[in-house]
Amino acid sequence: MERFIGNVLAFPASADLTGAEYNKDLKALNDILSKLSAQTLAGTRDNDPLELLDNRANSLGILFSFFARLSIDKNEIQTLWPKLIDFFSEFDGRQIKYAKDQLMAVLKAFLHFCDVCNKPILALKPLEHTIAQLNLPAGSKMFSSLHTRFVKKCLDARSFRAALTILDIDIEEFPPKGGDKDVTYRDVLQYYLYGAMIYMANKKWKRASDFLQFVLSYPGSAISQIQVEAFKKFILVTLMLEGRNFQYPKTIPPPTLKACRILGRPYEAFATAYATGNPDLLRREAALVKEIFQQDGNWGLAEQCLENFRRLGIKALTSTYSTLSVEAISSRDLDVLGSRNNSTSLEDLERYILDMIDQKEIKASLSHLPSQSGGQATSCMVSFHDLPSSETDILQDLEAQIARTVHITSQARQLDRKLGISKEWINYTTKKGRGGGGPADHGDQGYEEDDYPMQGRGSLMDIVAAAEAQGYMAGDYIDYDPADDMRPDYDD
Amino acid sequence: MADQFSMLDEGGASSGNAQYDDFDQNLSGQQPAAAAAAIMVSDLPRFDLEQYIANYAGRMKTTRLMFIGNHCPPLATEALKTAIGIIKNDKDVRLYRQAVQTLQVYAPNDADAKLDEDWIERTTREVKQKTDRLEAELKSYKNNMIKESIRIGHKDLGDHFYTTGDLPSAYRAYSRMRDYCTSNKQMLDMTLSCILICIDQAQYNSVQTNVAKIRNHIRSDDDLKVHEPKINIASGIALLAAGNYLEAARKFIDTNPSVGTDYNAVATMNDIAVYGGLTALASMDRNMLKTEVLESSTFRTFLELEPHIRRAVAAFHSARYGECLSILEAYRNDYYLDPFLQKHIDRIYEAVRTKSIVQYFIPYSCVTLDAMSTAFGVPAEEMEKELVRLIEGGKLNARIDTQNRLVTSKETQLRVEVHRGTLAMAEEYERAARLRMLQINVARSGLEIRAPKQGLGGGAGMGGMGGMGLGGRELRSMMFGNGV
């Protein structure tokens, strides 16, 4: 028992070990710990390793201790859970490098406990920390099944803001082939769908749209029900973002688009009605699809779209008019949430416009003028001003964008290099080299050279040019079997 | 009120997209009119029917008469009676029945309004006999294998079908001549006949293909002089029908006045002046009108025949838009009765109107609504609605001040616009790149969606796929593919 504590405390030998030495010592410690009996690791009441060791400095020891205690008695989680929260929120990812199985087992027990007592919020902080520590050095940038669990828990706990710490970090890597059996395409799709839902809740439409677009353009030979759900939400999010200029992005593979459009007809009809800009038509259509949307759990989103209709309508007026009376705006009947006859009063509309001005959505001013008839009533005029577009602001944005573009370009180059040394590519090139000789092959060789635009030069233009040169390359996606994939993949 | 607004909103919906939408919108705007079938002209046109029709030759005479009969009740009786007279000489039984039926609507008691069964029977028999005879002759020619007589056999048959109104058969017969034509002249004659039939049948795409063919066969200058105007007119009419006003205008304007009455089986010189003038007004700006229309030496001759078109063009050029529009308005009825113009006249007028408003506004930074409404001769409210439509359609860069009743031009900040555009493009690029990389990473990790295998558990499905990754090339092309 004391030896166990001693071993654990002796690691790391000094603070400035090199990476290799650190790993060697860690491996040794891991081996020792795995050979110890559960009893030893669990300790006794007077000699509790959980009390003696520090979560951060001795993460590995603590982990083994938890593991041992839970494997002796599953019910001990009832008393251990506060300590588990602390541990998972503090542990050092470097130490558990060789003990991921144990970590996952303990975490699973803990998550199960959260489920049982219906307190998803307990799991948030631990999960967040674990995701960041799990796959060092990539950390949160490496996708893991925990990502999906985390956002799901955030959704359950309705703590949408908390999810952003993980969601805002772009996933740059997925577990290597066969590396993590826990991760399936469903986890990935679910993560992005849930993520999109959280962004919607945070009203970050652009990011939500990006997430959904990824779900929709997900590669594969079949179509998932998750994609259909994403498609439905995508339509509504696009309406929020673009208003009347509704169109599908080109990145969605045609078979996916086709299947989704068949299954998402009511949504498309709604979008079409929205795009006409005709309030009566939209109102009718909304009434028609309301029930379906409610069943899908998308009505709230649709309501926001309808609410946005008026905003967009008023915004559009700014480019046509420089002054307009409130009555004239009111007669345009833009408020599609209310019924036609009982549209909002002029005062309400005035307040609404005022609100939009406050939110800086439009730049305008209101003025009350005595009405021409000379009575008490005054008519209210809205003067729209040109939106100021200070050049310095835009230049700043541009600078930031340039930095981001450079960053993403270098990422692309790295990825290209990785692909260049991947087994598939090497197999492909050697196979081609062996087959060589024929005239057709020469043509192919030329193609290959074109195919390396990013290795040496790698400028932005090259990528764009390459993208144009390559044209569209759709895989064989058509293999959709609705019966197999129809069962819902997630439960809310 | 609500309807009007909804229409306006529709205009706004397509504002972002280029001209195709405008085109559709115009079409959809017109559809109710087209669906309500024929446009009826209840006032008398400005021309004299007898004189007007005497200018045409061949089938065009009856075509135009029938057209007027269908669309202009006041002239219908006269037009149809004349048409019936001509048709009876021509042996076109189908057209005869049509003409008589139409006449029955307007003048049921007229002597001509009764079907002449005797004539029909006789003519049908005659036609049948002649067809049989010609076909038999052709057959014997074919047996003799003499190219020239086969050609003539086809030609005779084609002519016969043409006069009796069986246009598809006529076209077929004429096209069969192609293989037996031995000289350029024969080729030219044949193709011209084909074009004529296509115009009669309103198959303007075939007109275009035949025009393209004929150009290969014009070798000598003499041919060019004789046939060029006809080709120009034919393709001009085809382009007009396709709604390509600018190109149509250029064709008509380039037509050599030497054509005279040579092609009045299709259009007279007056027609060319009208078609050319209107399409030019609809599609050209002021400078182009001056250099290409008013100063064109060839087109001047035509314009002299229709002085009001000349006045309209000149008025537009000298920025007297109201005058131009009122001249056109005065002749609207005439143009409704032209088979080639009818469907397009509303669109052409609309285009001229839009253009005049836009051109009118160019020199100003601020105009009162009242000034504009007097300049264009419409009530201020209508003017405002029209302006709103133009602004929302993205055609007019202005804003309306309803309080002071002013139309003010928008300030354009080119620099800022360019910056914005750049920013949007870069953002789009970033998004696309990110998306693409995610896709590649998914593929690299073998996480693509796969159809679950029948009879296997979902969990086991992922295990077996280690060996079947994508080829490197596919991975790479995913990266660049799909267009940014």
Image: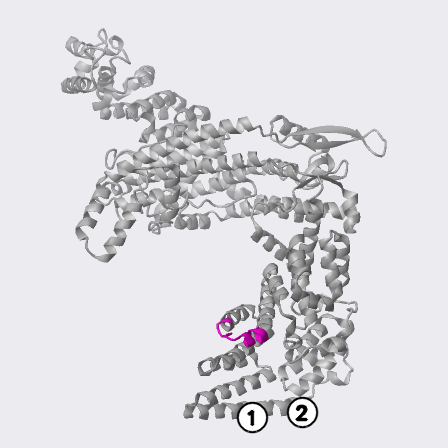
Q: Which residues are magenta?
A: B215-227
Closest to the observer, B457 or B3:
B3
**Residue B133 magenta:** no
Q: Is residue A214 visible?
A: yes
Disc 1: which chain?
B
Instruction: Tell me: A113 left or right of B95.
Output: left
Residue B462 drawn at (x, y percent): 26, 41
Which residue is painted at 21% across and 50% down in the image? Answer: A432
Establish if B250 lies above or below B456: below
Which residue carries the number 1 mark? B129
Q: How is the image coloured?
A: one colour
Q: What separation in Å lies between label 1 and label 2 (alpha carbons)?
A: 17 Å
Which residue is painted at 28% across and 13% down in the image? Answer: A55
Which residue carries the number 2 mark? B118
Most extreme residue toward the right is A374
Dot 1 amino acid type? Gln
Q: Earlier in the sequence, mark 1 or mark 2?
A: 2
